[in-house]
Image: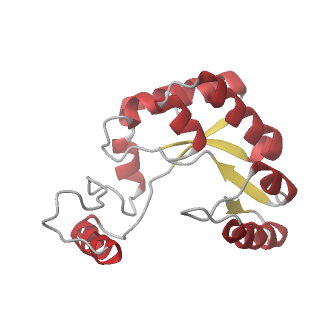
Amino acid sequence: LLCKNKTGWLNLIKLHNLSYHNFYHKPRINYTDLEKYSEGLICLSACLGGPISKSIINQDNHAIVAHTNTLKNIFKDDFYIELQDHNIEIQRPVNNILIQIAKSNNIKLIATNDSHYVNKDDAFAHQVLLCKQTQSKISDDKKMSFGVDEFYLKNTQEMRTQLSYLGSDIFE
């Protein structure tokens, strides 16, 4: 979620606080609260862990339609289908389906990159922090790991290159 204005900022704070009241392994919010506090907010469909992408991966067409329609109904023109590519094998086919969903539902596309550290060279330091947080070791085969070093702040050219397989007209 992004804030468009002060009302959006205040609503984002309300949603953040509510997410801890709904805590179950991780903070979370439900669609009812999201609708109640949607004013002034822009909604992006999220990464591979978001409800639409997860539904695509699970081949759950009913859930894809339900999540897409719910978010579009709540946010109207302030809902965007989010395309990412972190060199994770499943992202390219998911992106192709997300583009189809956006076109068939008249939803705008946006290219983003999950950023967990600033520079690509910071990936190892991030892995060390994950190990510390999860009380595991770098040498542990079962440690939490992002598996790639693409979760950094990319510039425009890097983003265009990363998503070039989608075609040059996709974001024009």
Of the 4 image quadrants, the one containing the C terminus is top right
Instruction: Please state which of residues 92 and 17 is positioned toward the viewer in this rendering.
Output: 17
Q: Residue furthest left?
A: 139
Determine whether 5 is above or below 98 in the image: below
Residue in the image at 65% along x and 43% along y: 80
Q: Residue furthest front?
A: 24
Residue 110 in the image, given as x and y percentages of width and height = 57, 44
Residue 101 in the image, given as x and y percentages of width and height = 61, 26
Determine whether 15 is above or below 77 in the image: below
Instruction: Tell me if 3 is positioned left or right of 85 in this view.
Output: right
Instruction: Tell me if 121 is positioned left or right of 82 in this view.
Output: left
Instruction: Tell me if 78 is positioned left or right of 120 in this view.
Output: right
Residue 7 in the image, given as x and y percentages of width and height = 84, 69
Of the 4 image quadrants, the one containing the N terminus is bottom right
Instruction: Please state which of residues 77 and 52 is positioned toward the viewer in this rendering.
Output: 52
Residue in the image at 66% along x and 37% along y: 108
Residue in the image at 79% along x and 46% along y: 75
Count of numbered circles in the view: 0
**Quarter of the figure with residue 93:** top left
Residue in the image at 35% along x and 47% along y: 86
Instruction: Please state which of residues 20 and 74 is positioned toward the viewer in this rendering.
Output: 20
